[in-house]
């Protein structure tokens, strides 16, 4: 029978192995958005900001009322809203990861990959900011209350709740951007930034899953249940704020009417559910999908 110290040493070695492989991957395949993205070419006036199918209004009578130019404008504002909210959450993420690695052994691969991830997120945030400026779309910041909740979360969250929050935000974006990067009628600047984000975030998601698994070893029932609900609440906040209400005024729509249409949009609900299948499978395997959490995910159409 293997002793507890021996088992712990084996787990630590396995965790270090994952982190080292992620470090090796980052050294082999990473991008510099400053040179990879074509920042100089003019934007074709007829190309969308994201695949029309990912527009919040696609499939609604309101979408049918829009002219083609309004649809193009709407999708550009929608993708920039997603990017702006992405920047906001990446700033939360960086602070949580820094706090988690505070005074840990810098020789460890886990520590070094965590800092690599932070460097990636800094580049991604600058990349998204430049993309929005190129599309001449204003920053869509989260409402004041949501911003304050984010400040509270990044200050208090730790272990699986911190990395779980990171994971749900990254997973939601990942499926969307995999479609955007292949969209033939999507702006080249969006396709390229999406590709960069997808490739590099794949490592970040694997790291988050590994940190969650490590944190959940030996976690008691109360802690598991509390973390499951907190992660679901974070998912609710992120999913509900990706496209800000003010976006709809960009094409001359009544924001209240547009938001009501989005809430009734069965096509969008289906797209969200399909994009979260793998996330839900992982959370279930990790013991982070209890009944209260599932009720939240169901309400926001992630299940």
Image: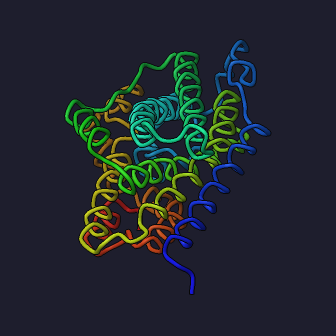
Residue found 42% across the figure and 31% down from its top: 91
Q: Measuring from the top left, give residue 14's x and y in whole percent.
A: 63, 62
Extreme residue toward the bottom, this view = 1
Q: In this view, does 182 lie above or below 9?
A: above
Q: Measuring from the top left, give residue 303's x and y in whole percent.
A: 41, 68
Query: From the viewer's perspective, is 301 left or right of 144?
Result: right
Extreme residue toward the top, this view = 40
- How did the renderer colour the structure? rainbow
Q: Is residue 135 above or below residue 115?
A: above
Extreme residue toward the right, this view = 28
Pick the front one: 183 or 26:
26
Quadrant in the rendering for residue 286: bottom left
Quadrant in the rendering for residue 233: bottom left
Q: Measuring from the top left, give residue 145's x and y in whole percent.
A: 19, 35
Q: Is residue 139 above or below residue 142?
A: above
Residue found 41% across the figure and 22% down from its top: 139
How many numbered circles are shown?
A: 0
Pick the front one: 197 or 48:
197
Pick the front one: 164 or 199:
164
Task: Name the quarter where the N terminus is drawn.
Answer: bottom right
Residue found 48% across the figure and 62% down from its top: 214
Q: Measuring from the top left, give residue 63's x and y in whole percent.
A: 46, 44
Quadrant in the rendering for residue 7: bottom right
């Amino acid at each position: 029978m293997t002793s507890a110290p021996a088992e712990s040493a084996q787990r630590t070695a396995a965790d270090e192995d994952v982190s080292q492989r992620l470090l090796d991957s980052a050294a082999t395949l990473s991008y510099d958005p400053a040179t990879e993205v074509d920042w100089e070419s003019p934007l074709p006036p007829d190309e969308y900001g994201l695949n029309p199918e990912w527009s919040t209004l696609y499939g609604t009578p309101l979408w049918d009322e829009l002219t083609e130019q309004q649809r193009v404008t709407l999708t550009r504002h929608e993708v920039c809203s997603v990017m702006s909210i992405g920047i906001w959450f990446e700033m939360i993420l960086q602070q949580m990861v820094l706090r988690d690695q505070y005074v840990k052994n810098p020789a460890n691969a886990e520590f070094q990959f965590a800092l690599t991830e932070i460097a990636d997120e800094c580049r991604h945030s600058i990349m998204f900011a430049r993309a929005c400026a190129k599309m001449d779309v204003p920053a869509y910041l989260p409402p004041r209350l949501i911003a304050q909740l984010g400040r509270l979360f990044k200050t208090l969250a730790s272990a699986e709740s911190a990395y779980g929050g990171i994971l749900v935000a990254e997973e939601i974006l990942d499926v969307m951007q995999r479609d955007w990067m292949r969209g033939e009628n999507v702006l080249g600047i969006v396709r390229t930034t999406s590709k960069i984000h997808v490739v590099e975030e794949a490592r970040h998601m694997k790291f988050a899953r590994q940190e969650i698994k490590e944190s959940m070893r030996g976690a008691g029932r109360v802690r598991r249940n509390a973390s499951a609900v907190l992660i679901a609440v974070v998912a609710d906040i992120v999913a509900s704020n990706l496209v800000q209400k003010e976006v709809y005024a960009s094409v001359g729509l009544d924001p209240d009417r547009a938001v009501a249409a989005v809430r009734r949009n069965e096509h969008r609900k289906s797209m969200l559910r399909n994009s979260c299948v793998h996330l839900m499978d992982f959370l279930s395997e990790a013991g982070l999908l209890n009944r209260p959490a599932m009720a939240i995910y169901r309400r926001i159409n992630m299940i």
